[in-house]
Image (cartoon, rainbow, N blue to C red):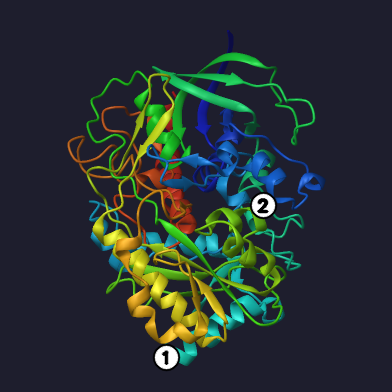
Amino acid sequence: MRERDYDVVIIGSGAGGGTVAQELAPLCRDGARIAVLEKGPRLRDDEFSGREVEMAQALYEDGGGFLTADGSMTLAMGCGYGGSTTVYTGTSIMASERVIRRWNVPGLGYAEIERRTHKFIVQNNVHYMEEERINENNRLFVQGCRHLGYKAQQFPVNVRGCRGSSLCNLGCPNQAKQGTNRVQLPRAERGGVEVVTRCEVVRLEGRAVVARVSPRPNAEKGEPSPWEPGEYTIRAKVVVVCAGAVHSPALLLRSRLPAKLPRLGHGFTCHPALILVAEHARAITNFVGHPKSYYLDEFIESDGFILETCMYFPFTTAKSLSGFGAAHSAFMRAFPRLQMILVLARDHVDRHNRVVIDGNGQPVVHYRFTPEVRSALARGTLTSSRIFFAAGAQRVHVPAAATPTVAREDADRLEEIVDESHFRPGGVTVSAAHLQGGCRMGLTAGDSVTDSFGRVHGVPWLFVADASLFPDSIEINPYLTIMALADRVAERIRRDAGPLLS
């Protein structure tokens, strides 16, 4: 067992970990030793090939195939230098005042979230995509919405020098997307922070982090870890857990913590999502340009869903379509003519939905689809189908229906055809990428895991700074809010650096 000593250890390098690393880097000038431990690899720029299965294996946890306990939903999470910020589309939206008010975290107000969010809007070059980068897949969504009287809104995105390769979810091959792998982590490293990749944290033992560094397998993408392969005990004065809404609670559950935390792992939410497709009579520009430029959120309060434009690659599209055989094959052969919409359900905290660990200490996510979520997915499917037909689609793939293919001549019967009774977990392909909760902020250990600054109740040297802090669904793409909260956590650590690091 090798041993190391640091003042601060940050576990995870995504929106939370990368932000904390950047914000604590000035402490290195005063002699502090800070390390980021990242489970996944760091890829060279020339290794971002854009090949779907290859990049999914390189950049996602379980190759993008992590399943809930009953196998009914796939949870997508990045695993590598930059975490999920390397593989998301760059959509960057500020949390609403209504959501932060509903969270009701003592000491945390919307004005502060807004101020800190603006900091990263500037830092990560968040702006509206230029007109020439908007592809037909997105234009057809806007066209369909306007025809029906809906108001589609444009996503602000964090890109610089986008070439419209549409490969955002596989890691940008042009280094245009401004995730933590391009902005915060390099700044932190220039400031003296060490980043150790291929380093999986097993557990915490007191103020020590027990970790395992893996060798780089032959022919696998990514650089070797800067540390020799093997087992490590890393002593630290402060530990900041930023491993995400699945792995952060799992890590704390398998660690020896000097505090009782009955809410640990509870409160998991994730925006369950359906990928819907529709076939047009002609080829459309769906896999060039930025893939996700518009969204529709006017039904979030009444029906609990948000619609987003999207474009997924052939393997992901194929596994998302219901049915099999000739009907399934016909949609896949029409890939160049497919318009796509992503339906996301707003899910709230439910007592059944939580993160636990199995006998080997591995995370297990229990999730049930509440009646509200099933209804939201069905209503979102119905609205998406209307948008598709209003945009000129010839036929639509409808998973929540007795027969998943609906032709244009049946467009007037959508209310009859789309029925949530056909939504059966395991029978419809559902995925989620906005993983939240499990280490919620609050006032006491009886109602939460941390205080409003991410400090774990009863453990003054241990902090959490990622989406697991969310007390309930953020309702939107969460990355800017994660960064705002991580910025807040880092500021508290800097403010208390004297007693914490002495």
Residue ID at (51%, 33%): 10
Q: Which residue is mark 2?
A: 170
Residue 180 rendering spot, x and y as whole percentages:
61, 49
Mark 1 burial class by Cα count in 10 Å: few <14, some 14-19, many 20+:
few
Contact? badges 2 and 1 (CB < 8 Å): no
In the rendered image, which quarter contains the N terminus?
top right
Residue extending farthest to the right is 46
Q: Quadrant of residue 14?
A: top right
Between 112 and 27, the residue placed more toward the observer is 112
Residue ID at (40%, 77%): 383
Judged left or right of residue 253, residue 83 is right
Residue 210 rendering spot, x and y as whole percentages:
50, 17
Between 377 and 81, the residue placed more toward the observer is 377
Q: Amino acid at mark 2?
A: Leu
Q: Secondary structure at mark 2?
A: helix
Is residue 131 placed above or below 231 in the rendered structure? below
Residue ID at (55%, 78%): 395
State how far apart marks 2 and 1 are (Cα).
34 Å
Q: Which residue is mark 1?
A: 149
Residue 206 rendering spot, x and y as whole percentages:
39, 17
Residue 178 seen anywhere in this rendered image of the structure: no
| Number of marks | 2
Residue extending farthest to the top is 1
Residue extending farthest to the front is 326
Judged left or right of residue 474, residue 189 is right
Judged left or right of residue 121, residue 432 is left
Between 155 and 24, the residue placed more toward the observer is 155
In primary-sequence order, the first of circles 2 and 1 is 1
Q: Secondary structure at mark 1?
A: loop
Q: Quadrant of residue 83?
A: top right
